[in-house]
Amino acid sequence: EDKVVQSPLSLVVHEGDTVTLNCSYEVTNFRSLLWYKQEKKAPTFLFMLTSSGIEKKSGRLSSILDKKELFSILNITATQTGDSAIYLCAVRRSGSARQLTFGSGTQLTVLP
Amino acid sequence: EPEVTQTPSHQVTQMGQEVILRCVPISNHLYFYWYRQILGQKVEFLVSFYNNEISEKSEIFDDQFSVERPDGSNFTLKIRSTKLEDSAMYFCASSPGTGNTGELFFGEGSRLTVL
């Protein structure tokens, strides 16, 4: 059974802080790892990672994958209150009809 | 920007009743999915649908559940006889066919409350 574990489960920081969210996984025939942000309802896509060591970056957010150690991190620099959300990590297998297995998420709260 | 739309946003039903949750996926997408999230728990895969048939389903997706694409635009999830434990947020998602990143685009969800 595929397994995705995220840590920490929750995190409270102040605006301007940098945070690192962790995701470790066990999956048969790994294809890709995806990060989503869930604010109120729908998860919205952040990144998809397939290759080790290649950083994906979007503004203050960045993410990297280590396929040897089976984990990924999501970094957010200079956090803002609008970054407060649940950050979800999900993995997809090869050959799967693109279904995702999600972790429990990290609840990030950014205080002003 | 194209989006996945879901109706209703919230439905309250009595145990044993049938419910139908509706989704309009993004128009040129080929893969459709239903996921659910019980309050405080993980987002869980229910079923994927491609080329007018179920391509994968989880153990949650038992005989009480069915999916349909009745008219080429809507994608529905039917729960025949709801149970208390079916109370959850149900997300529809879609993804393009070839050449995409594997990203799934999620709708805003339909919250189902079974009393």
Image: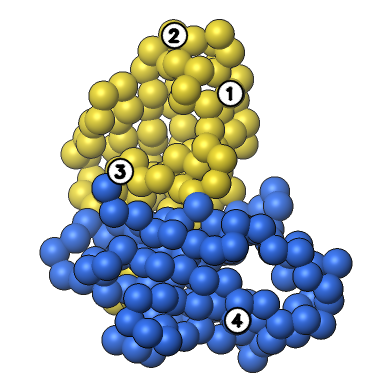
Chain colours: A yellow, B blue
Label 1 – label 3 distance at C-alpha? 20 Å
Q: Position of residue A71 (x, y in %)?
A: 39, 45
- Residue at x-position 70% and y-position 52%: B39
| Observer able to see residue B32 | yes
Label 1 – label 2 distance at C-alpha? 12 Å
Which of the 4 quarters of the picture holds residue B29? bottom left
Name the foreground residue: B37 vs B68.
B68
Residue to which mark 4 is pinned: B78
Q: Position of residue A19 (x, y in %)?
A: 45, 21
- Residue at x-position 71% and y-position 82%: B18
Label 3: state its secondary structure: strand
Mark nearer the viewer, 3 or 4: 4
- Asked if both marks, 1 and 4, belong to the same chain, the answer given is no
Task: Specify the subunit that label 2 lies on.
Answer: A
Residue to which mark 2 is pinned: A16
Outermost left residue:
B99
Q: Position of residue A20 (x, y in %)?
A: 44, 26
Label 3 – label 4 distance at C-alpha? 32 Å
Task: Specify the subunit that label 3 lies on.
Answer: A
- Asked if both marks, 2 and 3, belong to the same chain, the answer given is yes
Residue A109: which numbered mark, if any? 1
Mark nearer the viewer, 1 or 4: 4
Label 4: state its secondary structure: strand
Residue to which mark 3 is pinned: A47
Name the foreground residue: A4 vs A100.
A100
Q: Is residue B90 above or below residue B56?
A: above
**Amino acid at dot 2:** Gly
Q: Is residue A64 above or below residue B17?
A: above
- Is B101 positioned to the left or the right of A65 in the image? left
- Asked if both marks, 1 and 2, belong to the same chain, the answer given is yes
Which of the 4 quarters of the picture holds residue A94? bottom left
- Asked if both marks, 3 and 4, belong to the same chain, the answer given is no
